[in-house]
């Protein structure tokens, strides 16, 4: 499969490298082609990896992953182009964390809105599915890193797109428990979790943790 990764940070590089390893053709997009981080990733990831602009990557990908920093996601997706993203699934991993006033971060969107919803409004012809945004990037591609059962969530308006993403997470990364939260407004919950996530990271001194839902039988 041809997959676009928008964003050159650690999340995008981790996801992109795993997908190349699995045999996919992956193009990493950034503001301008030939950036130092993107070129270094291509050299490290090897055969199947390429880089270009946001627009080039969006046009290339059959599936598009938004791994940009949340405060820059809307601008990056605008640069990618609404037409290039039309009718495609956009797997949105971003969070609206704003560190402009230092730590702890605040959410630039919350309560009655979310970044996932803002992206869906900006791209009405795109099937936005929010997922993987509740954990560290190493766990995204290797859930076995955490012992036992734990969760990944999907939020989105298109049921078929969510089912496709759920299968993708299971087949490509080995996720066993994918929980469909509902429409894209449920991204408010998973994005808000990051306020607690950063505090747990500070308290535990590690990012190797994830959510487990203990369900009552029956």
Image (tube, rainbow, N blue to C red):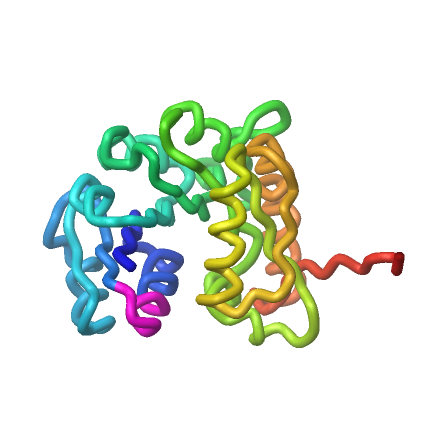
Count the numbered circles shown: 0
**Residue 123 sits above or below residue 37 on the image:** above
The answer, for residue 138, to whether it is visible in the render is: no
Does 107 sit left or right of 83 as displayed? right
Q: Is residue 94 left or right of residue 87?
A: right
Residue occupying image coordinates x 53% and y 69%: 174
Seen as rendered, the residue at the extreme front is 160
In the rendered image, which quarter contains the C terminus? Answer: bottom right
Expressed as whole percent of the image width and height from the top left, the position of residue 86 reads 30, 32
Residue 128 seen in this snapshot: yes
Residue 160 place in picture, x, y as percent: 50, 42
Q: Give how far across and how far down residue 163 sits, in percent.
A: 53, 49
Q: Quadrant of residue 126?
A: top left
In the foreground, 16 or 216: 216
For the point 53% across and 33% down, the residue is: 157
Which residues, given as a range, are shown in magenta?
Answer: 17-24
Residue at (44, 37) in percent of width and height: 128
Question: Could you tell whether 35 is left or right of 137 in the image?
Answer: left
Above or below, 34 relative to 206: above
Asked whether 100 falls inside the magenta stretch, the response is: no
């Amino acid at each position: 499969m041809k997959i676009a990764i928008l964003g050159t940070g650690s999340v995008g590089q981790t996801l992109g490298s795993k997908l190349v390893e699995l045999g996919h053709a992956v193009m990493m997009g950034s503001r301008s082609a030939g950036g130092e981080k993107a070129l270094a990733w291509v050299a490290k990831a090897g055969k199947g990896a390429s880089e270009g602009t946001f627009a080039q990557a969006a046009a290339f990908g059959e599936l598009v992953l938004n791994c940009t920093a949340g405060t820059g996601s809307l601008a990056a997706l605008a640069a990618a182009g609404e037409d290039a993203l039309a009718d495609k699934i956009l797997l949105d991993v971003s969070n609206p964390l704003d560190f402009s006033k230092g730590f702890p971060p605040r959410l630039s969107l919350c309560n009655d809105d979310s970044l996932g919803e803002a992206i869906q409004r900006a791209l009405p012809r795109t099937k936005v599915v929010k997922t993987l945004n509740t954990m560290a990037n190493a766990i995204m591609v290797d859930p076995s890193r955490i012992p036992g059962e734990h969760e990944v969530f999907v939020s989105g308006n298109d049921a078929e797109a969510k089912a496709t993403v759920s299968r993708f997470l299971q087949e490509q990364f080995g996720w066993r428990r994918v929980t469909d939260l509902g429409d894209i407004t449920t991204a408010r919950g998973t994005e808000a979790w990051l306020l607690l996530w950063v505090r747990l990271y500070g308290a535990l001194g590690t990012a190797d943790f994830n959510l487990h839902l203990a369900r009552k039988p029956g």
